[in-house]
Image: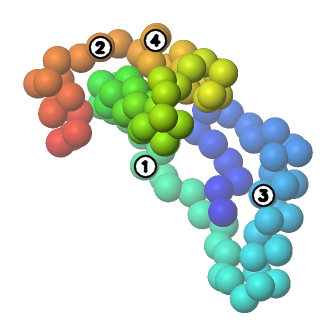
Amino acid sequence: MLTRASFGEIHPECRIATEAAAKLLESLGHEVVESYPEALLDPELRTRTAPLGRSAFSGGIRELSEILGRPATRDDVEPYTWSATELLPSVTVDEYLAASNG
């Protein structure tokens, strides 16, 4: 269970909902552990992984289009997802490979 984020505080209602979902899962016999991948705090993480961003979001929208049987539109996804395909930088194959191997 992730209860903190590298980008700031988690909204109290989201934290409450996360904790409620964890309690439900535990009541059904699942083991739930509060955890945080410390690698997300690495100050160079965004720099190293940014080249992967646009292609990852674009790939998700492409897959959604296949599922829908039509081109996905802005209305089919969250605003962040759509804007990531427009605002994140395009990269060369070499930059992509360097980021994915980093």
Q: What element does badge 4 sit on?
A: helix
Q: Crowding near pointer 4: few (<14 within 10 Å), some, many (20+)?
A: few
Mark positioned earlier in the residue sequence (2 or 1): 1
Nearer to the camera, 102 or 62: 62
Q: Residue at x 49, y 42 (%)?
A: 67
**Tag 2 and tag 4, C-beta contact below 8 Å:** no
Q: What element does badge 1 sit on?
A: helix
Q: Which residue is mark 1?
A: 39
Q: Of the residues shown, which amino acid type is indicated by label 2? A: Ser
The percent position of residue 24, horizontal first and vertical second, equals 82, 74
The percent position of residue 87, horizontal first and vertical second, equals 46, 11
Q: Crowding near pointer 1: few (<14 within 10 Å), some, many (20+)?
A: few
Which circle marks residue 18 in the picture? Answer: 3
Q: Which residue is mark 4?
A: 86
Alpha-carbon distance for marks 3 and 2?
34 Å
Q: Crowding near pointer 3: few (<14 within 10 Å), some, many (20+)?
A: some
Q: Mark 2 vs mark 1: give the one in front.
A: 2
Nearer to the camera, 45 or 78: 78
Mark positioned earlier in the residue sequence (1 or 3): 3
Q: Mark 1 vs mark 3: give the one in front.
A: 3
Q: Of the residues shown, which amino acid type is indicated by label 4? A: Glu
Q: Of the residues shown, which amino acid type is indicated by label 3? A: Thr
Alpha-carbon distance for marks 1 and 4?
27 Å
Q: Residue at x 29, y 14 (%)?
A: 90
